[in-house]
Image: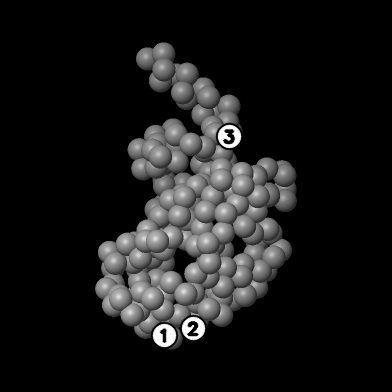
Amino acid sequence: MKHHALIKNISRFVSLTPAEIAIFEDFWVEKTWEKGEYLLRNGDICRYDNYVVSGLLKAYYINAENGNEEILYFSMDDWWASDINSFSRQKASVYNIQALEKTTVLQINYHSFQQLLREIPQLERYFRIILEGYLGTLQKRIIYNNIYDAEYRYFDFLETYPSIASKVPQYAIASYLGVSAEFISRLRKKYKSS
C-alpha cells in the first residue's frame, strides 16, 4: 500500500478504475533518503518526478554573488519535489533538492511518466491541476515579495505553513523569505516580549 497516499491525492481530482490503479502502481518506485542526502544536484538532469510520502525536503541554489544558500521551496508529506523545467525538458537543473530529514518518495522517471500519461490520459488533468496550484503559489510568492515587508511575509509563512515552520531551522525560513536569520531572531524577540 505504499501508493495509497498518492492515489488518495489523485482521487481528489480524477477517478481511476481498479485496472488503472494497477497500471499506475507499476510505474512508481519507492526510495528513501537520509537527512543531508540529495535527490538532485545543480548541473544534473532531473530524471525523476518525486511525490513525498513522508519527510521534508528543500530546493535551493547558491547565489553566485554572495555565496548564500537561497531556498526556493520546501516539500513535505503529500507534496511534490522536482525541478519541473529540468524534468520536462531533460536539461541540467539550476538547483539542488536535499533531504532535511529522512524522506521517502515515490519516483517516476521521465520516459515512464510520458508512457503513464499515454496509458491513463485523465492523469494529464491531474498533473495540470497540480501545476496550476504550484504556479498560483509561485505567483503569490512573487507578489508578496514585491508588495509586503519581511515582517508580514514571515508571519504569513508561519500561518500558511505551520507544519514546515515547526520543523525547519530559523536560518532556512530566513533563506526562503530572503532575509537574514538575525532579522527573524530580532522579530521573534520583539513579539515574545510584547
- Name the secondary structure under disc 2: helix
Taking 88 as reference, is 42 above or below it?
above
**Residue 63, which numbered label?**
none
Taking 143 as reference, is 119 above or below it?
below
Point out residue 194 in the picture as x, y percentages from the top left corner.
37, 15
| Crowd around label 3: few <14 · some 14–19 · many ≥20 (10 Å) | some
**Residue 119, which numbered label?**
1
Three-letter amino acid code of the residue under disc 3? Tyr
Which residue shows up at 53% across the image and 62% down it? 30
Q: How far is disc 3 from disc 2 in space, using C-alphas?
A: 41 Å
Residue extending farthest front:
1
Point out residue 128 in the picture as x, y percentages from the top left corner.
38, 72
| Crowd around label 2: few <14 · some 14–19 · many ≥20 (10 Å) | few
Q: Quadrant of residue 41?
A: bottom right
Three-letter amino acid code of the residue under disc 2? Gln
Residue under numbered circle 2: 115
Q: Is residue 182 left or right of residue 7?
A: right
- Name the secondary structure under disc 1: helix
Q: How far is disc 1 from disc 2 in space, using C-alphas?
A: 6 Å
Which residue shows up at 28% across the image and 72% down it? 14
Residue under numbered circle 3: 171
